[in-house]
Amino acid sequence: MPVKSAQKRPAPDFHHETLLGQKHGTPVAGIDEAGRGPWAGPVVAAAVILDENNIPEGLNDSKKLGEAHREQLFGKICNSAVVGIGIMDVEVIDRDNILNATLAAMQQAIAKLPVRPAVALIDGNRCPDLPCPAEALVKGDQLSLSIAAASIIAKVTRDRIMCEMALEYPRYGFEKHKGYGTRAHQQALTQYGVTPHHRRSFKPVRKLIENGPS
C-alpha cells in the first residue's frame, strides 16, 4: 500500500482581511503576541496594518521561520506597513495574570498605531476590549497575512528584549532560550536564583522561591 504524503498546510493569505474589510470597512489590523509561556521576560503584542499592494513575500507564522528570516521580514514589514507594539512586563503579568497581561498588550499595540483601524483580526479565541470591532481567529498566524506579520513583529521584538536582558544577567542564557522553561534555564534558576525579570506567579519560579536555590 502506498504511503500517503503529509498534506501541506496552505500559507496565510488576505482572505479574512478582505471579508472583514467588506463588513466593517478598512483598514484591518492583524494582532498577535509572543511570550505567553516563558518563565521570564515580558509578553509582547503587535498590531499590523498591511498595505495590500505592498505585502512582503514570505510572511508566515513566526514559529515556522528561522531567526534570520524573521529579522529580514521584520524590517520589510516596518518599512511597508503600519505597526504598533505593546509590552507588558513581569510586574503586570504577576499582578493581573498572563491572560489579562496579554490582552492589555494587545490593547496597547492598537493604541500605538498611528492610524485607527476599522476592525481588528486577532490570533486565538479571545478578543481584548478595543475601540473598534474585533474578530478572533484560531491559528490566525497560519491563516491571515496580517496576523502572521504581527507574529513576526512581536516575536522579533521580544527576542531582542531577551538578548538585552542576557547582557544584564549573562549566566541565565536568556539569549538562547528567551525565557522559556528549558533544562538549561531550570539549572540556571536552581544555581543562581530568581532575577527581577522572572515571573513569580508561574509555578516553577514560585516553587523555587518557596524552596530556595540549591
Image (cartoon, rainbow, N blue to C red):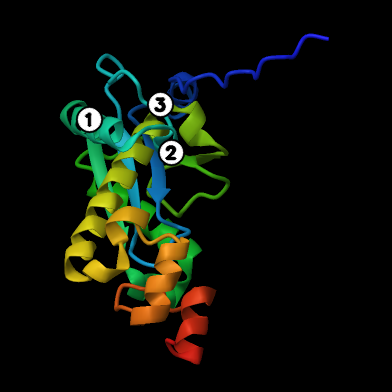
Tell me the number on the disc at residue 72. 1
Q: Which of marks 3 and 2 is in front?
A: 2
Residue under the point 33% across and 29% down: 27
Tell me the number on the disc at residue 151. none
Q: Position of residue 48 (x, y in %)?
A: 31, 36
What is the CA distance from the residue labelled 3 to the residue labelled 2? 14 Å
Of residues 203 and 109, the one nearer the viewer is: 203
Q: Residue furthest bottom?
A: 211
Q: Which amino acid does label 3 sit on?
A: Leu
Q: Name the residue under label 3.
A: 145
Is residue 79 visible from the viewing direction of this image? yes
Query: Dot 2: within a 10 Å radius of its alpha carbon, few (fewer than 14), some, or many (20 or more) residues?
Result: some
Q: Name the residue under label 2.
A: 63
Of residues 77 and 195, the one nearer the viewer is: 195
Q: Which of marks 3 and 1 is in front?
A: 1
Marks 1 and 3: in contact by CB < 8 Å? Answer: no
Q: Is mark 3 on a helix, strand or loop?
A: helix
Residue under the point 38% across and 80% down: 191
Marks 2 and 3: in contact by CB < 8 Å? Answer: no
Q: Quadrant of residue 174?
A: bottom left
Q: Which amino acid does label 2 sit on?
A: Lys
Q: Position of residue 210 (x, y in %)?
A: 50, 90
Query: Dot 1: within a 10 Å radius of its alpha carbon, few (fewer than 14), some, or many (20 or more) residues?
Result: few
**Image quadrant for the N terminus?**
top right
Question: Relative to residue 165, is residue 69 depicted above or below?
Answer: above
Q: What residue type is labelled 1?
A: Gln
Residue under the point 29% across and 34% down: 70
